[in-house]
Amino acid sequence: KIYKRGHFIKKNFFNFGYNSTFNQSINLFLYNWNCIKLKRLYNNISCKADFESDFVYMPLVGGFECTLHPVSSPLNYFIILDYLHSILPKNCYIYVKEHHAQFLFRYHQRFARSKEFYSKVKEMKKVRFIDINENHYKLIAKSKFVVGSSASSTAIESVALKKIYKY
């Protein structure tokens, strides 16, 4: 029998089954609503970059990329930010910028971050969320160095702009 009504869904802990069109529609609505809420949250907690201060730049990857496992990526980010905080001088900030496609309605690729992720990062000392519309290339060029994931396009852009890139 050919199944035509969507994808498998998680129904319980390690319990998956066929999805219904109605359930798929509800989940798509909830995903879109979450995109709107989290974009608004990010806009409220982000700020314009101060290019006169010392900073390192850490752009976030867009959801489920092969560079960071989606289940462990929040933990990876917290470990990276804690490490950066421990090695940077007191007057050096960590500028974190969300991926430009994170809040788009992407049916094929749902985002992995949550309100709790943004709240925890916002509480970290010397970490600043940067406005999503801030110029990415200027952030790379003006930073002390760039932090990212190996398969990220930011790595290539950093090398092209002759900046140190740390993975």
Image (cartoon, rainbow, N blue to C red):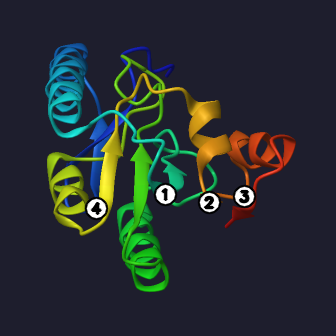
Q: Earlier in the sequence, mark 2 or mark 1?
A: 1
* Tag shown at residue 14: 4
Choose mark 3 or mark 2, whichever is in front.
Answer: 2
126, 98: nearer the viewer: 126
Choose mark 4 or mark 1, whichever is in front.
Answer: 1
Q: Which residue is mark 2?
A: 144
Using residue 147 as the reference point, say whether residue 33 is left or right of it: left
Determine the residue positioned at 25% across, 19% down.
28
75, 24: nearer the viewer: 75
Residue type beneath disc 3? Ser
Choose mark 4 or mark 3, whichever is in front.
Answer: 3
Q: Which residue is mark 1?
A: 55
User: Are the residues flagged by discs 4 and 3 in contact, CB closer than 8 Å?
Assistant: no
Determine the residue positioned at 57% across, 32% down.
136
User: Are the residues flagged by discs 3 and 2 in contact, CB closer than 8 Å?
Assistant: no
Q: Earlier in the sequence, mark 3 or mark 2?
A: 2
Choose mark 3 or mark 1, whichever is in front.
Answer: 1
Q: Which residue is mark 3?
A: 150
Residue type beneath disc 1? Phe
